[in-house]
Amino acid sequence: MGAVLSLFRFKAWEFDLAMKYLRTKRKDGGIAVIAIISFVGIMLAVTALISVLSVMNGFRDEMVSRLLAFGGHEYVSGAPLNDFAHRDETLKRLRAVPGVTEVSPHIDQYGLVQSTHGETQATIMRGVAPDVLKGTKIVADHIQKGGSLDSFGVGEYGGDNVLVGDDLAQNLGINAGDEITLMTPGGSTAFGAAPRRKAYTVGGIFSSGVSDIDKNFIFMPITQAQLFFDREDEWDVIELKVKKPFDIEKYHDGVAAAAGPGAVVYTWKEINASLWSALKIERTAMRFILFFIVIIAMLNIISGIVMLVKNKTRDVAILRTMGADRSSILRIFFIAGTTIGAAGTACGLLLGVLFCTFIGDIQHFLEWVFHTKLFDPSVYYLDAVPAKMEPTEVAFVVIASFLAACLSTFFPALWASKLEPVEALRYE
């Protein structure tokens, strides 16, 4: 171990000589042009890697955030929902769990919706507490003109106003204020199954930006839903929201303890397991693939140091004759290569951070220059490309790039240290 550490005990004259070699022009045996090309290649590779990964993180978080803004982060079902006498106590215990910000029950029912024009479509009717829906920003902040949440939950059993998704409303050809008929499977009678039907008023139309929500969901007050579905005082599930949904596992034990025996507790990651797994695999794969850009840039360092060693063979022989040992020769060329890699990585880090920080301004400037929309907000419901830099990911890119530079430099430097003075001067 001591022998390995001794190889990297750098001396001041070794740094001076390595920097001199990098500054020397090609005609004098230097690699200044190749060093510049290598530096630019590494800088752009690191910039691209940080930028692409950050944009992917931005889109991923935007998509998941919209999904979580609509639904809960953790859910409780099972025995606590059937214990009517102690359900309110269960809600109080769940609200007291550290990190839990919201606790609310809801019920869902599949059925059909029919407009006055005769168009019919399958839908999911969700009964929610009015105050919970008004606090769901992805819905409440995207009510289309002509509708509002003011009348939602007002009246006996919550009233007869419902909220309809934008895509569903377009398919039915309805607007705010129109009447629709909801139908659900009913109980059996002497004449067969009799579906329940009831007319409701469209109090508002929301456009959340999540297509599965906008084309399938109708919201109604939970008390009205219990009445219409003939499920008096029943809940399907208790929905919880927490401060840090991406770290939902940290809350699991506390929620399970508060829910009590017989409770079934599951998280949004379990519900969307296939989506979450696909996102993680995509993230890992893109890291691996994009890092090849850095490796390709590092090949320029290898070729540059090899050329430098060939050009400085006579210098190596003279240094060895004057008493420089093999480790000193190795360190000189190692310093030259890693300096290029470190400088390129540092500048790439700076450019990547600046690009991700001002990506919205850059996008709007390009749109102004080319008089066109580079990013269609009507498709993604965003006015700019999202970018989220994660410190651990940026640190990984920087450290991996620097280590790659060190590794690509080490072997040409090791070759230089093995040159014998006699062989080096034989043809001089």
Image: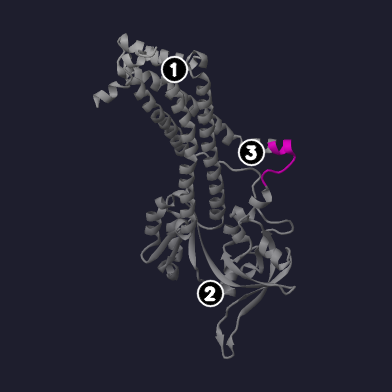
Which color scheme did the rendering employ for the protein?
one colour
| Contact flag, marks 1 and 2 (Cβ < 8 Å) | no
Q: Which residue is mark 3?
A: 360
At label 3, the amino acid type is: Gly
- 370 within the magenta span: yes
> Image quarter for residue 111?
bottom right
**Which residue is the extreme one toward the bottom?**
190
Label 1 to label 2: alpha-carbon separation:
87 Å
Q: Which residue is mark 2?
A: 231
User: Which badge, 1 or 3, comes first in the chain's sequence?
Assistant: 1
At label 2, the amino acid type is: Arg
Residue 298 percent across, percent down from the top left: 46, 31
Q: Which residues are magenta?
A: 366-375
Residue 136 percent across, percent down from the top left: 58, 55
Disc 1 is placed on an element classified as helix
What is the number of the mark on residue 311?
1
| Contact flag, marks 3 and 2 (Cβ < 8 Å) | no
